[in-house]
Amino acid sequence: MSSKVNATTMQVTSPDEVRNVVLIGNAGSGKTSLFDQLLKARIPGYRGEKEDAERASQLFLASFVTGDKLVNLLDAPGHPDFVGELRAGIRAADAAIFVISAADGIDGAAQSLWEECREANLPRVIVLTKLDAGHADFDTSVAECQDVFGDGVRPTHVPTFAGPGQVVGNIGLLTLEEHDYAGGGRVVRTLNAHDDQVETYRGPLIESIIAEAEDETLMDSYLTDDEHLELGALLDDLMKAVATANLFPVLPVQTGTGVGIEELLALIEHGFPTPGLHPNPPLTTTDGEVLPQIDSDPASPLVAQVIRTTTDPFAGRLSMVRIFSGTLNTDDVVHVSGHRSWVLGHEDNAHPDHDNEERIGLIQGAVGVELKPRQQAIAGEIVLLPKLGTAETADTLSSKERPGVVESWPLPEPLLPLAIRAATRNDEDKLAGALQRLAVEDSSVRLDRGAGDQLVLWTTGQAHADLLLGRLVERYQVRVEQEELKIPMRETFVGKATALGRHVKQSGGHGQYAVCNIEVEPLERGAGFEFVDKVVGGAVPRQFIPSVEKGIRNQLDKGVFAGYPMVDIRVTLYDGKAHSVDSSDMAFQMAGALAIKEAAAAKGGVVALLEPLDLVTVTVGEEYLGAVMTDLSGRRGQLLGSDSVDRKAVVRALVPQSELSRYAIDLRGIGHGSGTFTREFHGYELLPAQLLEKYKK
C-alpha cells in the first residue's frame, strides 16, 4: 500500500495517519533490541543506537512509516528509578508494546509496569522474546501471562521451530498462515493442516473476540462451523478489542533475528488506536474549571503537553511535546501553564506555578532517530521544540484565546535522600544553577535544606542518584561530595528541674547584672514552648521579663544537650534579682540562656532526645508481606495494620526517619521489585536511651 505520509519529512495530513506507541519492559527483556529491529525493518541503513546510562534512563523517540501510517515509537526506561519517564511515555502514547522475556518470566517489576499501563487503560500487545533460550517455553510463558495479567491475554500467533531453540517463524491463528523467516526474508504460505498447538489457542481466541464484539451472527457461525467464519469480520473485531484495551494479543518475536517483526508492524498499523480513540487527558481552565473533552481535531484550539525536557549547557532546553488538539505552527505565540501544586497538593519551590506566553521557534520532527525542521505539526503528533524558555515537563501549551491546563500524569515521589556539598569554592558558585537545571529537566528531583541547613537531593533510587551526580560533573563541571544525612532530632525535658541563671560581670564602667530563677517541666508532644511569668514583688523588673524569655528561646533554638532545638516544655520564671544601674536587656537574655542550660545539667537525666517518625505505607506483592513486616520491625517500626488489595499487601507503620534513609533501595530487594511506599511526617517520639550517644555532640 502506498503511503499518504511524506516519508522524507514525516509530514501527515490527518491524525488518523498517526500511531503513537510506547515500548515497555524490564531491563534485560529485549525491549531496546526490539526497538532497533522495528526501525531496521523500515529505515534503510539504520544500525541501532548506542546503549549508555543516559539512553537507558530517558524516554527515547524515533519515527518511521509503515504502510500508510506514521509510527512515533517511544522507548521507555525499564528501571523502576525512572518510572517518571515511563509515565510520561504512557501519556504521550495511544498504545503499548509490552515486552516479556520467556527466559526470565514475570517478576514483581514487570507486574508493576503492567499496573502502570492498566491504570492508564492503555491498549497493549504482549511480545514474548528470548524463546530461543534453552529453558524457555511458549506455552508456559502464555499461561504465566494469563495468570498474572488476566484472561484478556490471548495469543494471536504461535512460534514455529526448525529445531530446539531455533525459532524460524510463526503461525497466525486467525489467518491460518505460516510466516517463515528461515531463509532470511519472510515467506507466507497457507497451512494445509492444524497442529495441536494451533487448536489449543485458536478456539479461545475466537471466542474472546466474539464475546468482546457481542456479534450474534459471528457466534452462530462459530458454533455451526468455525472453518467458514468471515475472516475480515474477525480481524476487524480483534482490532477493536485491542484498541479498547479489552484484549491483549501475544506475539512471539525474536529480537536477534527479526522473526515476527512484520506481524508486529501489521498489528501496529491496523490494530492500534488512532490519536483520540484512546481518550485524551482531562482539560481545565487555568482557574480549575473543567473544559469539554479534548477532541483531537487539527482545527480545534491548540492543546499540547510537554512530555519531557532535556537541557544542555550550550544548546539550552529541548522539549518533547505531544499535541492533543489543534495545529502548531512555527512562530506561534502560545500560552504556557504549569501548576504542579495541583498534583502535589502543595507548592513546589523548584517548580513554581506559572502562566505566561511564549513564542514557538523552530519545530523539529523525528525522521528515524534524527531531527528535521518542520513548519507545522497537527493533533496526534509528537514533536520537539528547542529553547522554550519557561516550559517544563508536564506543562501545557495552549492557544492564547483559550488557555488551558492538561492534567499531569502522577509524578513519582523521590524517596531516597542524598546529602551533598560542593567539593570546592568554585563548585559552590556553580552548584545552585546546575541543580536548578537538573530539576527543570527531571520532574523526579526535589531539593531541600535539611537539618543543619544541609543540602539534600531527593532521588528515586540509587541508579537515579548516580545518574544525577554524573550529570553534574559531565554537563556542568560541578563536583560534589556526599555526606551522612543529618536527622532533624529535637531535645526535650522528661522531668521537672529548677535552675538559677546568674550573669554578673564588673570590669570598670558599666557592669552587667542579671539573675533569674526558673522551673522547667515537660509538655505533651507537639505543644512547642510555653513561657510563664510568676514573678512577684518586682524581683525581675517588668521591662526585663521579655528579655529572659528571649534569651531562653534563643538558647532553645541552639539546643542545650546535643545541639538540636528543644521543644515541648514549659518554663516558669518565678524569681530573680536586678541592679538599678548594671541590669540591662542583654544581661537578662544571657541570664535566661544560662538558666535553661543549668536546668538541663541538673542531676537525674531530665533531658532526652526526640526522633522524627514518618507514617510509612508499603504496597508489595502478597507473597512478600511477611518479609516486609519483619524488616519494618527491625527498623524499630510500630506496625499499625495491613490490608490486601488486588493481590497486593498494604502495610502501615510508624518508622523513625533515621531508619528510612536507604529504604527506597532496600524495599526493592525485599519485594523483588514489586514494592512501593509513601512516607509522611507523623511527629516526634522519645529516642531509646541506648541510642543517645549516637546523636550526642
Image (tube, rainbow, N blue to C red):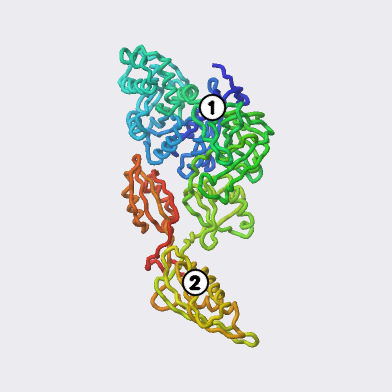
**Residue at 43% from the left image edge and 16% from the top image edge:** 188
* Residue picked out by circle 2: 531
**In front of the other: 74 or 478:** 74
On the rendered structure, is 386 left or right of 108? Answer: right
Work out whether mark 2 precedes mark 1 in sequence or the reverse, and give the earlier one: 1
Residue that numbered label 1 is attached to? 71
Name the residue nearer the viewer: 25 or 390.
Answer: 390
Residue 205, given in percent of the width and then of the height, sits at: 36, 22
Give coordinates of residue 113: x percent, y percent: 43, 38
Q: Position of residue 147 (x, y in %)?
A: 33, 33
* Element carrying mark 2: strand
Q: Please state the horizontal and vertical placement of residue 281, each as a whole percent of the image.
A: 51, 34
Q: Dot 2: within a 10 Å radius of its alpha carbon, few (fewer than 14), some, or many (20 or more) residues?
A: some
> Foreground: 547 or 138?
547
Amino acid identity at mark 1: Val
Circle 1 packing at 10 Å, graded few (<14), some (14-19), many (20+), is: many
Closer mark to the observer between disc 2 and disc 1 = 2
The amino acid type of the residue labelled 2 equals Phe
Mark drawn on residue 343: none
The answer to whether residue 171 of the structure is visible from this angle is no
343 vs 322: above or below: below
Depth check: give the residue in front, 250 or 481.
250
**Label 2, label 1: how many angstroms apart (C-alpha)?**
70 Å
Report if residue 482 is visible in the image: yes
**Do callouts 2 and 1 mark residues in contact (Cβ within 8 Å)?**
no
Q: Which quadrant holds the N terminus?
A: top right
For image coordinates 54% across by 42% down, the residue present is 54
